Structure formats: C-alpha cells, structure tokens
Image (cartoon, rainbow, N blue to C red):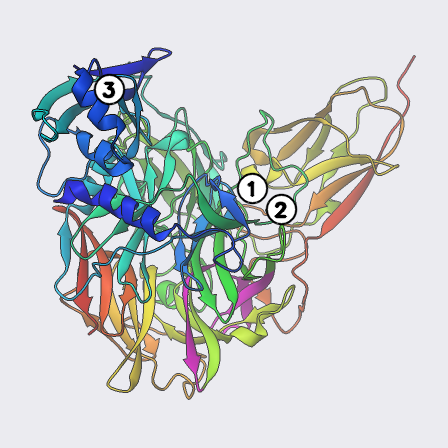
C-alpha cells in the first residue's frame, strides 16, 4: 500500500508499505538507482511531459520502501506516488499508483502595510529612500508592479524608483527598502537631464502601495495604502552631530537619554549606528527608540545610569533622508574634498550624567 | 525517460566518484554547505561554482562534480523551466524564484540558483539543466566546498530593539578574474558603494577586502557613492578591466589592477544608457574579430554594444540629453525580449532566461 508518513503531525515522507515478501527481497538486493526507480513521487495529479520526479532519498526498511523529499511538502498540493517494480526472477511486475491531497494550511492573517518611513509630512526634494513595513512576510518579485508615485494632478510620476531585480528586503521579508532612482537625484546624469528630478519642492505627492500585492502565504493586500507628502527644499549638507541636542538624565535612574536632531535622519540607520560608551570605553546595553518623525533618538539603559562622562559613538554611515552622511554629503565637490579611505569611521559626542538627587 | 535521468545521473556520479575536498584546490571542506540562500552565481576554476548567499552574508565555492554529458546547444529551448524546477523541489511554479543562471564553461550545462518557498522560510537550491532539458537538483549533502563570510556593516550592533537583524546586503553580481572573485553588493540601508575582491582559494575567514567606487557626474564637479549593480570582466589592450554598470545608469570601466583594498577609485564613464535602464546582466564576447558587450536591462530590452574602441573611448564629460545613450555605440537586439538573465554559452551562443506572461523559458540564442 502507498501512504504518506507523518512526523509531529506534518507529512514528511511517502512509503510503499507492506510489500510482498518477494518484492521486498528483490528490492533488498537493489542498488540506489533501482530503489529510486521503484518509488517516485510527482507534484500534481498527473505529471506533465518532461516533469521531473521530486528529489529526495530512498530507504528500504523491512517490507517498506520510504522516500523522503529533500524539501518540505507543501500544504494544499496534490502528490502522485508511483511504485513500479519490474518483473524479475520469478516475481510478477508490481505496480501501484495513488494521489494524495494534502489539506490546505490554515491561512494566517493577510499582510498589510503598517508604516512607511520617513513619517514626516514634508520630505526634501532629494529624498533618497523609503522603508515600507508590513505586518507579515511578503512575496518577492512583484514589488514594483504595486508601487506608484502620484503627482499633484493624480498622474504617476515617470519611473521614479530604482527597480532592482533583487528587491531590497530585510531577512524577515517584512521591510522593503525603496530607493528613488539616484540617476534622477544626482546632478548631471541623463535621467535627470531628460526627465527632471522625481520630486520638486512645493509639490504634493502620494506614494501608493497598491492592493493585490501578494504576501508570502499567497494572500493579497486588501487595500491600498497611501502616504501623502509635500516636497520641501533639498538637503545638501552633511550631518553635523554638533547641532544635536543631548538631554542626559540624572544618575540612578533608567530614564532615557534623549538626543534631538534639527531635521529627520534615516530611520533604519538610526536604529543601529549610534551607541553609548562609558569613559572606560565600555559599550552600554539598552534599548533604542527612534522618536516621532525620526527627529530624535532615545536610549534606555538596561542598568541605571552612573554619574560620569560618556560618549555617543556615531558610525559615519548614518545618513539623513537624502543620503548625506556624517561629515560627507551625498554629492561631494571633488575639488574641495578628498577622502581616500573607505574604512569605517566613528565620531564621538561627549555628554555627562550628573548625580541625581538622593 | 526524464524520470530515469536523475538517478542514472547520480549513479554515474557515484560510479565516477564524486569530487572530494582533496580533488579540487581551494575546496577545503566537505559535507553540507550551510547555504541560507542562493543568489548570484559565477564559475571559477574548473568545477568550482561560486554562490552568493545574501541571507547568510557569505560566499560559497562549491565543487559541482562531473557534469552531465548532454551539453546545451543551438536551438535549445526549455519552456516552463520554473514549473519543472518547482516539480523537482516538490512544489509549484508560483512557489519558487530563479535568482541567477550560469553556464559551466566547457560543459554547456546550466546551473540555476533558486529560492524554494516565500518569505523568511524559503530554502536555497542549485539546479542543473542539461541539453536534453532535464532538470536535476544538485545534491548538496556531501560536497567539497569552501566558505567565506563577508564583513557586514561596521556598525557595532546590527539588530533592532527586538533583536532582529534588519540590515541585509544583496549580493548583486559575482565574477572570477585571474584568481580573484569580485563581488558587488547593495545594502538595504546605507547607500554603500563597496566592491569586494577576494582571492581564491580563500585565505581564511573574512578576507574580503573592498574598494569604494564613486561616480563623477558630468559637467558638475560632483562625485557620489555609487553602488555597482552588475559587472563583467574583459580585456582592453591586454589589460584586465571590469566593465560595470552603476545603479544610476552610467557604464564605467576600471582596471582590475586599481582595485586595491581600502582605496577609493573613480570609474571612467564610457556610456550612459538612459532613464529606467537598469542593467540586469551582461556578457562580453567576440565576433568577427571584434569585442561586444551584450546587456540585458529592465526597460530597453537587450543591447549590443561594441567595445572595440573602448581603449580609445574618451571619458564622457557632458551629460547626455535628448534621447538616451552616449559614448559607446549600441544597438537594441529586437529578437530578444523579456530577458532577465544572461550568460555565455560557448563562443557563439548565449543562454537566456526569458520571463513573460506565458511563463519562464530557458533558451540558447546565437550571439548577435
């Protein structure tokens, strides 16, 4: 008999079980090729021309030949099992077929857009990227069909995004990085000369995430998600940490250290490019929160603050919304700047924790 | 017949003796490589396939063993290649993604890097296709291999407050030139511009060194970091060069000799391809004594560009207006549509992956 084998409630293998003694004895003398020929499993109720059998390994245990696929079986699909042992040495040919339909998996809640960063209502006209956050993992390969930037007249802006075959997802497939075509931002390149910049200061735009985009479970976004924003003046200066306002709490508490910026910085990079070090060079553990409109950064230490001198240590890969870095703008005048090194660099911003009231 | 193939092939491999770690120089480990994903592919020394693992932030060199005999040749066309690959992996076409296609030099066998499944639980696979259209999954349980981890961001802590890493560097292209593997990557956070080079055999863990590539805009005295999307090695006047396409459209060249660790280099812009012209893949070939570049891109089909005068080509210094490209001459190859992957198949053909409304097909076409 042909059957499916389950482990911990999940289908993991196929088996031709309770084989006649002669058949089992014949298989016991067979090589791996013959075992593979004897039991094959195909996707679907009927294999199409040239359709390969599922790849996996075969094992004979007593009167059962088991096939374990190399990749997990997929809920909701039909699998056809074929057992075929040619006649030999007095054995009759033995041929069995069976289709097994795996029940569909319970569907998780369909994904939806939770947030689009930056969150501010006004973005610089040289805005470089957006982060689209979803409530559940998404399917790769169909992002750009579902993304549009609409101008004030409601018409789509021509080719606004850098469309990458790789689609820049985070490892959990719940955050997509969407870049505005840098060829439309950088001065002196054909795309910008021909079509102008994507965003122009004073314009009102809508970034539309269209419904129909499939998530990893195959369900679709049920409704459009729109972020409306106004384009403001370009930001063409470096991030200057000296303009940040550091609000240190007093010692003895676990109150957050709050750092305020004069304008928004990149949400993702804020999450990982700033750390706190004690005077002894020890990095403090704690929780980082990015504040409203990405204009502030908070750090709540795991241990209460001790009085003393500290440094904010800032990785210079930190960027603002337009790709300007700490100490280096997005577009550098090559005759006034010359930096040869591409080594990672950090800048420090000292602050003090003063003793709290007893 | 096709059903027989997989096992007969395996049997042939077993009979021939699967390559072992000692057989292929540089493949120092044997067993199951812990690939988290399979993306960009490139062949290196004989029998060595480099696989870019974006999810695992690593490069693997895998011994592929003896190739099937039936080489892909003129007129080859495999319709529904995604469905066949999916069937071998126990699922349906909608559940797989073909990330890259590479042809093993000298054998005419195609290798496809595949993601099986969607979302964070997807699994990597390397699939072979031979000239008879037979699809088989490369068994990775016990192969000779080597691995090198790529240094990620210099940031001290690459995890968010829930402890989840969010940063990812997509490995967008690989090429092997003169004993070195070149790796283009694109971060999903900072606008980085690192091109890594790595000697093979790998000299130990984490030996990837990187150069920073910048792009100088025409007319303006401005330069910007500029990620390289795809590139191809070729020779100009006997000097090995990389011809690279930036994400912001210019095609640039730089001598391989200039790619020194920690240096910053400016590519020489030799062509600008125009708006929405995102290069997907490219190959270099010779025909009638002249060298050409064949470039598949997202909006303009496949371009054939003569690189014959590349060494004499002056760097572009003015922005190109009113219609598209400048610098090197190019023509669009009208017969080739919807090409998403491209690799050389011998001296006279290319193997292309075509994706359109009627599905995906793998085809051999004569180099134009």
Q: Secondary structure at mark 2?
A: loop
Q: Whole-Å distance between the Cαs marked 3 and 1? A: 54 Å
Q: Which mark is residue A266?
A: 1
> Would you place residue B260 above or below residue B126 in this image?
below
Question: Is disc 1 in contact with disc 2, using a CB cutoff of under 8 Å?
Answer: yes
Looking at the rendering, the stretch of residues picked out in magenta corresponds to B210-237
> Would you place residue B184 above or below residue A146 in this image?
below
Of residues A273 and A354, the one drawn nearer to the viewer in this rendering: A273
In this rendering, do the residues under marks 1 and 2 share a single chain?
yes
Q: Secondary structure at mark 3?
A: strand
Q: What x and y, as percent, mark residue B56?
A: 50, 41
Badge nearest the viewer, 2 or 3: 3
Q: What x and y, as percent, mark residue B138?
A: 33, 45
**Chain of the residue under label 3:** A
Of residues B217 and B71, the one drawn nearer to the viewer in this rendering: B71
Is residue A213 in sight in this rendering? yes
Can you identify the residue that label 3 sits on?
Answer: A15
């Amino acid at each position: 008999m042909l059957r499916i084998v389950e482990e911990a409630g999940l289908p993991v293998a196929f088996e031709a079980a309770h084989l006649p003694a002669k058949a089992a004895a014949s298989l016991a003398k067979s090589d791996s090729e013959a075992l593979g020929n004897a039991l094959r499993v195909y996707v679907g109720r009927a294999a199409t021309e040239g359709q390969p059998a599922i790849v996996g390994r075969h094992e004979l245990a007593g009167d059962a030949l088991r096939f374990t696929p190399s990749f997990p079986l997929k809920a909701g699909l039909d699998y056809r099992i074929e057992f075929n042992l040619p006649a030999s040495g007095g054995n009759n040919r033995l041929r069995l077929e069976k289709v097994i339909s795996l029940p569909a998996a319970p569907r998780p809640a369909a994904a939806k857009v939770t947030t689009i960063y930056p969150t501010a209502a006004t973005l610089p006209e040289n805005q470089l990227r957006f982060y689209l956050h979803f409530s559940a993992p998404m399917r790769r390969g169909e992002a750009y069909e579902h993304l549009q930037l609409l101008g004030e007249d409601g018409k789509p802006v021509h080719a606004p995004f850098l469309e990458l075959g790789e689609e820049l997802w985070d490892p959990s497939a719940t955050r997509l990085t969407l870049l505005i075509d840098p060829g439309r931002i950088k001065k002196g390149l054909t795309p910008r000369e021909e079509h102008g910049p994507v965003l122009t200061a004073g314009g009102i735009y809508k970034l539309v995430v269209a419904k129909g985009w499939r998530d990893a479970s195959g369900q679709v976004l049920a409704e459009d998600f729109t972020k409306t924003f106004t384009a403001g003046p370009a930001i063409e200066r470096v991030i200057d940490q000296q303009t940040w306002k550091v609000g240190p709490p007093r010692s003895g508490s676990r109150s957050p250290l709050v750092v305020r910026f004069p304008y928004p910085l990149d949400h993702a990079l804020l999450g990982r490019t700033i750390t706190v070090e004690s005077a002894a060079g020890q990095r403090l553990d704690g929780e980082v929160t990015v504040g409203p409109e990405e204009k502030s950064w908070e750090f709540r230490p795991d241990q209460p603050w001790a009085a003393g001198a500290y440094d904010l240590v800032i990785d210079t890969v930190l960027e603002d919304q337009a790709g300007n870095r700490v100490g280096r703008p997005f577009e550098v005048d090559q005759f006034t700047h010359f930096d040869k090194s591409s080594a990672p660099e950090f800048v420090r911003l000292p602050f003090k924790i003063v003793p709290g009231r007893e | 017949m096709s059903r027989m193939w997989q096992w007969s092939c395996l049997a042939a491999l077993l009979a021939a003796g699967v390559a072992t770690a000692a057989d292929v120089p540089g493949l120092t480990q044997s067993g199951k490589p812990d690939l988290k994903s399979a993306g960009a592919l490139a062949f290196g020394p004989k029998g060595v396939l480099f696989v870019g693992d974006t999810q695992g932030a690593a490069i693997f060199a895998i011994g592929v063993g003896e190739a099937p005999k039936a080489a892909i040749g003129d007129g080859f066309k495999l319709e529904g290649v995604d469905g066949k690959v999916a069937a071998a992996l126990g699922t349906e076409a909608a559940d797989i993604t073909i990330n890259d296609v590479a042809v093993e030099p000298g054998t005419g066998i195609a290798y496809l890097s595949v993601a099986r499944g969607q979302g964070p639980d997807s699994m990597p696979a390397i699939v072979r296709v031979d000239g008879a259209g037979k699809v088989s999954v490369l068994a990775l349980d016990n192969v000779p291999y080597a691995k090198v981890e790529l240094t990620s961001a210099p940031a001290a802590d690459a995890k968010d407050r829930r402890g989840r890493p969010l940063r990812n560097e997509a490995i967008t292209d690989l090429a092997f030139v003169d004993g070195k593997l070149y790796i283009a990557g694109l971060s999903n956070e900072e606008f980085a511009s690192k091109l890594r080079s790595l000697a093979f055999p790998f000299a130990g863990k984490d030996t990837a060194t990187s150069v920073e590539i910048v792009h100088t805009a025409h007319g303006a005295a401005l330069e910007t970091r500029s990620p390289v999307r795809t590139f191809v090695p070729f020779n100009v006047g006997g000097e090995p060069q990389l011809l690279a396409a930036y994400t912001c459209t210019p095609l640039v060249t730089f001598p391989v000799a200039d790619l020194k660790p920690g240096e910053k280099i400016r590519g020489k812009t030799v062509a600008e391809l125009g708006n929405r012209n995102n290069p997907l893949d490219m190959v270099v070939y010779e025909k009638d004594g002249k060298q050409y570049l064949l470039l598949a891109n997202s909006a303009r089909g496949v371009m054939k560009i003569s690189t014959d005068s590349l060494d004499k080509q002056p760097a572009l210094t003015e922005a190109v207006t009113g219609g598209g490209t400048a610098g090197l001459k190019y023509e669009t190859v009208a017969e080739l549509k919807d090409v998403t992957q491209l690799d050389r198949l011998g001296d006279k053909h290319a193997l292309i992956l075509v994706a359109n409304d009627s599905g995906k097909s793998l085809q051999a076409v004569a180099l134009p």
